[in-house]
Structures are given as C-alpha cells and as structure tokens.
Image (cartoon, rainbow, N blue to C red):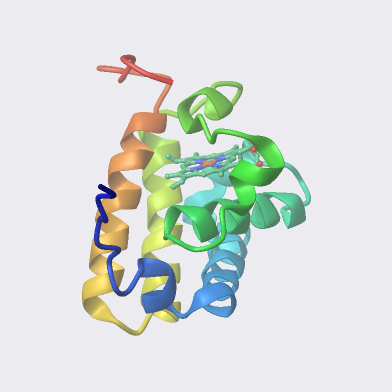
Amino acid sequence: MQIEFEQPEVTPYQLIGGDAAIRKLVNRFYELMDELPEAYTARKIHPADLTESGNKFFDFLSGWLGGPQRFVEKYGHPMLRRRHMPYAIGTEERDQWLLCMKQALEETVADVQLREDLYEKFAQIGESMRNRGENIHSCCH
Ligand code: HEM
C-alpha cells in the first residue's frame, strides 16, 4: 500500500509572490547593505560587487521557501554555517545583516504575518552563522 502524505497547499514561495517577489527582496536587501552606514561592518566582509551574492541568495531563497531548488542543483547542499566560515561573523555583523533584512522585508513584503515569520527564521539562522565571539553554535555545519 502506498502512503500519501499531504502536501501543504500554499508554500511560502507562493505566498511571497514567487520569483519576482524574491528578486525584489534580495535586490533591496543588498542595496540597503550597500547604502546604510549602519551596515558597513557587514558590507565590508562581502565582495565589492554584490551581483553574484544576490544571485546565490536568490537561488537559495527560492528553494528554502518551497520553490525551485536552484541552489542545491547548482552548488549542492547549502551547509550554510560551513559556507560562512571564511567570513568573520560576530554579533555586529549578524545584527547589521538582520537590520538590512528587516527593512527589506518591510519594504517589499506586504503580508505582515509572512514578513514576521520570515524575519524570525532569518534571525535564527543568522544567529547560527556567528563564528566569532561568545557562545558560538557548533553542533552542526
Ligand atoms: C548573520 C549574518 C550574515 C552575514 C554577515 C552573512 C555574510 C555572508 C557572506 C560574507 C557571504 C559570502 C559572500 C557572498 O557570496 O555574498 C555569504 C554568503 C551566503 N549567505 Fe550569508 N550572511 C549572513 C546570514 C545569512 C543567512 C541568515 C542566510 C540564509 C537564510 C544566508 C545565506 C547565504 C548564502 C546562500 C550565501 C552564498 C553561499 C555560497 O554559496 O558561498 N546568510 N553570507
């Protein structure tokens, strides 16, 4: 007998508005990181040209939100913590990254509940990206 699991009817990918909405969020996020003086410490550890960063983040978010698994198809398992290891991320970098994300979400995602849920997730993952300072998360990659 084949067991059928119910698929959720609407994915966050659909809820946010698919590719176009994710592109808007990503573009605004990196624009803010580039422009806000308060985000300078986080900006400094990124490449001078943020085009590829934006493309990779778009590919990641697409799959993470339940849409096409572009990042995994191109680069393999995300292993986010491991991929962030070459960059010094402490509380300051984390907070600045989250500041840009909070504002980008507010400006580009109309659904308040979705925006808040996404921010909460980003904050959790952001905390686990920290690889400098106190109480570093170290149980997994
Ligand atoms: C805590 C604050 C964070 C900082 C300071 C940070 C910084 C960086 C830096 C410097 C890079 C490498 C350059 C680049 O490709 O742009 C990078 C890559 C990336 N980040 Fe973050 N990041 C943070 C949090 C996050 C979070 C929360 C996510 C996902 C939800 C994320 C997803 C990615 C992805 C998918 C890449 C590309 C990985 C690769 O293929 O190399 N980052 N990040």
Left-right relation of 4 to 82: left
- Quadrant location of the C terminus in the rendered image: top left
Question: Residue 51's quadrant in the figure?
Answer: bottom right
Q: Please name the residue shown 42% across and 60% down the image.
A: 65
Q: In this view, does 132 lie above or below 26?
A: above
Q: Is residue 35 above or below residue 141?
A: below
Q: Please name the residue shown 42% across and 76% down the image.
A: 14
- Residue 96 rendering spot, x and y as whole percentages: 43, 48
Left-right relation of 132 to 59: left
Identity of the residue furthest to the bottom in this view: 110
- Residue 135 rendering spot, x and y as whole percentages: 25, 17
Of the four image quadrants, the one with ligand 1 is top right
- Residue 117 rendering spot, x and y as whole percentages: 24, 62
| Depth order, front residue of 35/53 | 53
Left-right relation of 13 to 127: right
- Residue 50 rendering spot, x and y as whole percentages: 72, 53
Question: Residue 28's quadrant in the figure?
Answer: bottom right
| Depth order, front residue of 113/102 | 113
